[in-house]
Image: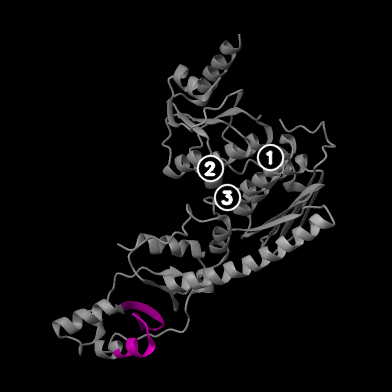
Amino acid sequence: MKTSQLAESLKYSLVVAPEEDREIVTGYTSDLLSDVMGNAEEGSVFITIQAHRNTIAVAQQLDFPAVIICNNRPIPHDMENAARQNDVAILKTEDNQFIASYKVYLALNTQKQ
Amino acid sequence: MLRALPIGTDKATTAVMEIILRLKIKDAMTTDLKTARKEDSLRFIQQLMKNSYVTGVPIVENERIVGIVTVNHIMNALDKGYIHEPAEKYMGRALVVLEDDMPLSFAITYFNKYSYHRFPVIDKEQHLVGILTSRDILTTLLQELNAEMEELEGKIDMKIAAERGCTLNVITKDFAVNKFDFENAGRASFELKKILKERKVSQKIIRRASVASYELEINLVIHSDGGRILFTVDDNKITIETMDNGPGIPDVSVVLEEGYSTANEWIRSLGFGAGMGLANTRRVSDEFDIVSEMGKGTTVLSVINMEDKNEDIAIG
């Protein structure tokens, strides 16, 4: 599923939308960056409350197309800029990580059928 | 309006960034100071400026800076007729100072943020130890760039030699990493990833190298008193090495255990300090070594072979 489609279907706001609308294959939910480094798969959307620049660094290192910031956490400018420079989309929602993970899972798997 | 120095964090090339992060303000500042006392007359300071070709004179009391007199103050004094009066009443007191231990990059943001032409530099004891102008920065930067270019030209020669004879295709990069510099954390890893992509190394190997380099780089930022990350890429393997200036690890076997962490609350609140960094690094490495000495520092070595011998390695 394309990043823009996911944002639209979940009604999550697309804070940073890179030119290249990349494909989301699966997802990973965590607030521990080393856990993500060690375990997440390529093409994942990264669901987290860690709204800072280092989240984008991890996404970039692991080739994630997008991150979803939960609980409506404010997104700092340097994070937005880093995301733009590295073609990582940022989505934002008031949902918590549990609800967001459920919705993303459902959206990705409904589409597959 | 002054033009901003185009060597700030977002516009600089990697080479320039490396230099301005590696160098400290004390490496660039002028230490041959022309100072005056607050009792000195503005006329005396004007003469001092004229004789020593400076445009700003710090006013010092007990080795500490208490004010500054610039050409502007002198012009006003001449204009309004108080050039014979002591500096104390008219000197600039709204002082913005830099510390000698700060990275040069910090000074550049200050030049771009304020319209001052110079910043007094103090040490940890708050003593005035130097003065920094944009000219000092440019001179130092050019000196360093010259040295870098010289090295680069040497490498090009080596590469040509390699193309004619040996085929190892070695690239070596060296980055300084500063304590708690989350702003720039990941730069070395991005660079390594870029090189591996250009070399069309397999996704799986890039992935493993990314995990190892990022974890080791972040470890330097979080746990060390600053250090370096060095990587070497050739046709056979990727070698990532970090060296830090301390504080050292009391028991190396413990830090390799998953979940062991010494990170404090604010580091954890950023999502770091899960206690998985070194475990992750070791898992993706074909060769791994860590040596630490208390009070001296820690070196970590991770080697990843280009040929994927560990097909079963779990990297997600």
Q: Position of residue A101 (x, y in %)?
A: 55, 22
> From the viewer's perspective, is residue A62 above or below residue A78?
above
Quadrant location, the N terminus of chain A: top right
Give the percent coordinates (x, y) of residue B39: 27, 88
As drawn, B247 above or below B134:
above
User: Residue drawn 60% across and 53% down?
Assistant: B221
The answer to whether residue B301 is above or below residue A94 is below
Determine whether the residue tagged by mark 1 lies in a helix, strand or loop.
loop
- Distance CA(mark 3)–CA(mark 1): 22 Å
* Residue B225 located left or right of residue B85: right
Badge 3 crowding class, 10 Å Cα cut-off, few under 14, some 14 to 19, many 20 or more, is many
First along the sequence among labels 2 and 1: 1
Please state the horizontal and vertical placement of residue B55, each as a whole percent of the image.
34, 80
Q: Is residue B53 magenta?
A: yes
Q: Are marks 2 and 1 on the same chain?
A: yes
Q: Is residue B233 left or right of residue B184?
A: right
- Tell me the magenta residue range: B47-68
> Label 3: which residue?
B185
Query: Which residue is label 2 attached to?
Result: B270
> Disc 3, disc 2: CB below 8 Å?
no
Residue B28 higher or lower than A13, as above or below: below
Q: Chain of mark 1?
A: B
Residue at 84% across / 56% down in the picture?
Answer: B166
Residue type pointed to by label 1: Gly
- Name the residue nearer the viewer: B9 or A32: B9
Give the residue pinned by disc 1: B259
Dot 3 or dot 2: first in sequence order is 3
Res. B103 mark = none
Is A64 on the left or on the right of B65, as rendered? right
Q: Residue at 23% of width from left, 87% of height from top?
A: B86
